[in-house]
Image (cartoon, rainbow, N blue to C red):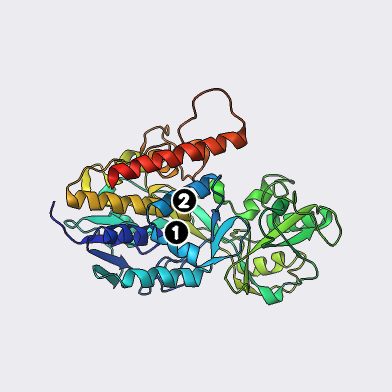
Amino acid sequence: MKSAEVIIIGGGLAGCEAAWQLLRHGHAVHLMEMKPQQFSPAHKMKHLAELVCSNSFKSNDPASAPGLLKNEMRRLHSLILSVADQTAVAAGTALAVDRMEFARNVEAQLLQQRNFILSRIEITEIPHDPLTIIATGPLTSDALAQSVSSMLGGSYLYFYDAIAPIVEADSINMDKVYWASRYDKGTPDYLNCPLTEQEYKRLRQELLTGRKVALKSFEEIRHFEGCLPVEILAARGEDTLAFGPMKPVGLVNPHTGLMPYAVVQMRKENISGTLFNLVGFQTKLTWPEQERIFRLIPGLENAKFARLGSIHRNTYINSPSLLLPSLQMRNNPRIFFAGQITGVEGYMESTAMGLLAGLNAAALIEGKSFPQPPSATAIGSLLKYITSAEHDGNFQPMNINFGLLETLPGKKIKKKEKHTLYVERATKALQEWISCID
């Protein structure tokens, strides 16, 4: 196939990463992004690569599954990881970024490329002829979603995802909170709000009875288990929150020398530390109820909210039945899908699928055979998950985890040692794969 311009629809993490990989290989890219002409219910910035749910890319620990995926993507010259490293804010062992600086930087680096064109326009129909990567993410506009659904010959799968609120730092009562990271790992980068048993039970009760955003009558609630609204967790049992996002273990209060009954953790939202994100407190409570209920948390009595939580529909396709391992449509190889719309969950996971879509599209243009990454790697295991048929008709979004990687051979291995072995094997497998594709 002769070299040609590749159309990418969607300027989120996956679309930007796919564009970068194509540009690296010398191919022209026309990226189409509907902002600021049209905004989804959750997007606010005009820039590309806007982070919506959180400013955290999860663990940076190389011995963890998220850390392994990040290191693999660094080896593959990921633009998103490079910019994330440059705009990082303190977050213990996690990689979190100043989301405004991050988005500006990603956009600026793409705009500097000679073969890159950016059109600020909403696409409502899938192009028929050009090589196209659909990376519209979980918040695909209704018009384009209908076009994609018609092209696929079936309906979307979807679930609801909720966004956590952000608090202004100078409105936090610092006399009631304390800095700490769980088990003192890394630097003490989290602000912790300690709760007594009575305070915890009152907060839980208010979460249960607080007014929620009403859904339309035709909408079906299908929450993703990895990102449940805090009120849904509260409804699952009296102690569910205390053993989940409000777990106090490893967070001894230096003011008392004791471990609280429960803890609400807050993480820096920007480099300057003027904003804090309530960790694990994604919600679909109404905005007035959020202000009332979250001010029951010690230290947040007078909190000013820079952003309140909201709920939006996340859309994804039934990739195992629709996509090849190359992320091409089975019945139309000129169409690729990338990012969260493919059924991966998480910023890095979505970016990884954009990276692979870009590499596969480049190989198709160049007429090259392109082997897919081995399932012993983190990126390869994600790809296998979304494109294999082993789901028994119950395909759901998935984060990276060691359970996706090929099982280690031999006898039963201790968990800590097992993770080390997974990382060692993945690192070797990635290097061998890179040697084949370079």
Q: Residue furthest right?
A: 256
Residue 315 appearing in the image? no
Query: 162 or 105: nearer the eye?
Result: 105
Quarter of the image holding residue 40? bottom left
Q: Which residue is found at the position 17% from the left and 47% from the top?
A: 367
Q: Residue furthest left?
A: 2
> Residue 25: image x %, image y %?
25, 57
Residue 175 appearing in the image? yes
Query: 247 or 294: nearer the eye?
Result: 247
Label 1 is placed on what type of residue? Leu
Quarter of the image holding residue 146? bottom left
Disc marking residue 81: 1
Query: 136 or 350: nearer the eye?
Result: 350
> Residue 370: image x %, image y %?
26, 43
Q: Which residue is mark 2?
A: 71
> Residue 47: image x %, image y %?
41, 72
> Residue 261: image x %, image y %?
80, 52
Label 2 is placed on what type of residue? Asn
Viewed as shown, does residue 90 lie left or right of 251? left
Give the answer, above or below, for where 185 lies relative to 106.
above
Q: Which residue is found at the position 44% from the left and 59% from the top?
A: 81
Mark 2, other Cα within 10 Å: few <14 / some 14–19 / many ≥20: some
Q: CA distance from mark 2 to mark 1?
A: 9 Å
Give the answer, above or below, for where 232 lies relative to 392.
below
Label 1 residue SS: helix
Viewed as shown, does residue 298 lie left or right of 150? right
Give the answer, above or below, for where 407 lies relative to 232.
above
